[in-house]
Amino acid sequence: MMRLILRKPTPIRAWGFDPQERSVDDLEIIYEELLHIKALAHLSGMVKRQLTSVLVFECHEKAGTVLFHQGDEGRSWFIILRGSVNVVKYGKGVVCTLHDGDDFGKLALVNDAPRAASIVLREDNCQFLRVDKYDFNRILRDVEANTVRLKEHGQDSLVLEKIPTSTQHSNNNKHHHVSYRYSVMAGVPEKMLEHLLETRIDSKYDPTDTFLEDFLLTHIVFMPSEKLCPALLQHYHSERTSSRGPEQETIDHIVNNKRRVVQLVCLWHVVAGYAFKQDTTIMQFLETLFSAVCDDCPAYPSLQDPLASLEQVLKAVKSTKDSGSHTWQVQTQVLSESRTHQEDELRRTPIKAKDETIFKVYCADHTYTTLRVHMDTSVTNIIQTVSEKMCLGNDLVLCEVKSSGERLSFHQKDVCIATSLSCNGRIFITLRDHLDALTPLPEQEGPSEGSVSFLEPTSSRELAYQMTMYDWQLFLCTHECEFIYHTFGRHKYRRITANLDVFLRRFNEVQSWIVTELCLTSHISKRVHLLKKFIKIAAHCKEYQNMNSFYAIIMGLSHMSVSRLAQTWDKLPNKLKRVFSDFEALMDPSRNHRVYRLALSKMRPPIIPFMPLLIKDMLFTHEGNKTYFEGLVNFEKMHLVASIMRVVKYCRSENFKLDSPPAVKNVKEIVSYVRNLQVIDNTKRLMQLSYTLEPPKT
C-alpha cells in the first residue's frame, strides 16, 4: 500500500497535478511505515512527518544496475526498502554491502560534494525510497533551525526540538507572536530529569506535551529506580549554588526545589500504579524522602501540604506490600490460584514477583519433581534446585517441550517461566547434549473428545459474556510496564511479565479451542451448529468490545484445518457467511491493520484490545529505533513506546459494566468451562483430524 501511495506525485514536482495528491490518510500510512525503518531511527517525529510528503518510490529490476557512479553530482538520498547493493570504489572494488533498512548517498548532499563511491545492485527487483536534494536540504535547514543543543563539558547533554504551539495576534492583526514549546529528542538521563523538574512540574497542562508521563512510563529502560531514586534525593537536598540575591529568594528557591521533587514522586505513583507499589527500591526511597521532608517542615512550613501528599502515597504502597502473597499452581492447562480460605472465586488478583508458583519439571524418561518457588526465581536457581533434588549433575539446560515436540531453551536469567509456556507446553530438564532426546508427554496431546454436548444447549451470549468478564480480569491484572520487560528482554531487568504472559496465552487458548472443538466433532450437522455458535459468540464479543477474543475466534475459524472443511462451510446459512466475511474484513492486516485501528479509534472505553497487535507494535518500535545514539537516550523512541502503553491505559480507563444475560442454572459450570479450556495446540494433529472429517479430494 505504501508503495502505491509513494508513486503519487510529490507536491513540489507535481506539475500539472493537484498538490494535495497525497491525502492525509496517505501521509499517515507512510509515517507509520517510516517508524520501522532503521535508517530513520535517529530522526525526530517532526522530520519523519516532513519526509512523508517528499519521499519517492523507486524500483530497479536487474542486478548489476548502477544507481550512480563515483564522482557524479549528488542529487538524492536513498533508503533500501528491499534488496541489497554493493558500495564500489575505484581501485578497491566492493568495500561493503548494504541491505534492507540501510541508507546511502546522504554524505554528498550534506557536504555538497561528488559521490564518494559507486552503488551497484546485488540482486533483482531492488526497491528504494528516494529523497531529492532540494527536499533534503530544506528539511535539513528546518531541523537545524528548530533544534536546540545543551552542552556540558563540550558534549551534548540534552537535545530539544522547538515546536510552534499557537499564534497570538495583536489588536490590529498586523503583528503576530508565535509561542513555542520544547520537546525532548534525546539526552543524558540525569539532564532529562533536571529539565523535567524545572519545566514540567509547575507548567500548565498541555495534552500535546507528554514528556512527563513518557519519562515516568519508560524510565526503567534508561534510568531504573535504582538510579532514579538516588538522583531524586540528590535534587531534593541540593542547595542554591549562588548565595547572591535576597535571603527570601534563596529560601523560595530551596522550597520550590523540594516541592517539585515531592510532586514528581506523587505523579510517579499515579502514572506507574501497581508497578510503583511493588518496587522495593521505591519503598525504601519513599521512607527516606518522607523522613527528609518531616525534618525540613519546621524550617520550611510550606512543605506541610507536600508532606501530606507524600504520606498518602507511602500508606498506599505499604498497604499493597502488606496485602500478602499468593500461590499459583500450574495445572493441566492454566495457571490457577491456590486459595487457602473461602474467597470470591471469580475475582483474580495480579501475579506478583514474590508470589509462589508450583509446577513440575520433567526428565527425558518423564519422571518429574515438583517445585514451589517465587515467581522471580531465575532459571539458574531452578536448575540448581532440581539438580540437587534429582542428583542430575552439571551442564544442565531447562527448556519447554511443546506438544509438537519443539524444544525451546530458557535463558539462564529468565524468570516466571511457568507463565511463559505455550498452551500444552511442559518444563523439562536435561543434559545439554541430550536435548534432542526429549519427547512430549502423552497428556500434552490434549483432549480426544470435544465438548459439543455442553456447547449446544449453552447460550452464545452467556459464553461470550463469561469469556469477556474473564478477559477483562486478565487485562486489568496486566501492568503497562510488562510490555517493556517483554519487548526489551525481561532477563535484563529481572522483572516478571507473568500477567502479560497469561493474557497472551489466553488468546492462543481461545483460538486453539475453536479449532479443537470443530476438528473433534465428527457429525457434520453438529459441526455446522458449532460453526454458527462460534460466529455468534464472536459477534457478542465484538458487541462487548472484547476485541481480543473476537480476533481469537475469527482466527480460529480461519485456521487451515477449519477453513478447508468445504462441506461444513457450504451448509452454513448465507446470512452467517456474510457476517463472517465482514468479520474477516475487520481482520485485514494490510496497511498495518488500518481497518481494525480505525474501528478501535471509534470505540470508547472499556475496551479489551487485540493484544498480539500491541505486542507487534511494541516490537517494531523497539527493533526499528535505537535506544541510544551518540551516548544519548533516544527519547523519540521513548515517546513511541509510551504511546503504546497509553493505549492500554486508555482502554481500561473506565470500569467494565455489562448487563448480564438472562440467568441460567449452570452459570458456575459455564464460568469453569471458559476459564479452563481444553485444547489441542499441535497443528499437525489438528490437520490429521481435519483430513479424517473431510478427506482431501484426489
Image: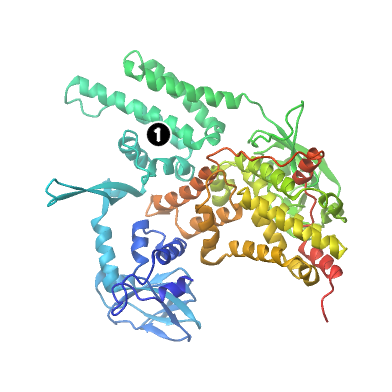
- Please indicate whether residue 159 sits to the left or right of residue 178 in the image: right
- Please indicate whether residue 428 sits to the left or right of residue 117 in the image: right
Query: What colouring method underlies this structural image?
Result: rainbow
Q: Residues within 10 Å of mark 1 (few under 14, many from 20)?
A: some
Q: Position of residue 503 (x, y in %)?
A: 65, 47
Can you say which quadrant of the picture contains the C terminus? bottom right
Residue 598 visible, this orientation: yes
Residue at x 58%, y 50% (from the top left corner): 609
Q: Give the residue at the far top of this rendering.
A: 298
Instruction: Write down the residue under mark 1.
Output: 231
Residue 519 visible, this orientation: no
Q: Position of residue 120 (x, y in %)?
A: 42, 82
The one nearer the camera, 496 or 243, is 496
The one nearer the camera, 587 or 482, is 587
Q: Where is residue 107 in the image (x, y as percent from the top left)?
A: 31, 70
For the residue marked with disc 1, what is the amino acid?
A: Ala
Q: What element carries label 1?
A: helix
Relative to 315, is 673 above or below? below
Residue at x 82%, y 79% (from the top left corner): 697
The one nearer the camera, 353 or 580, is 580
Residue at x 60%, y 55% (from the top left corner): 612
Relative to 622, is 267 above or below? above
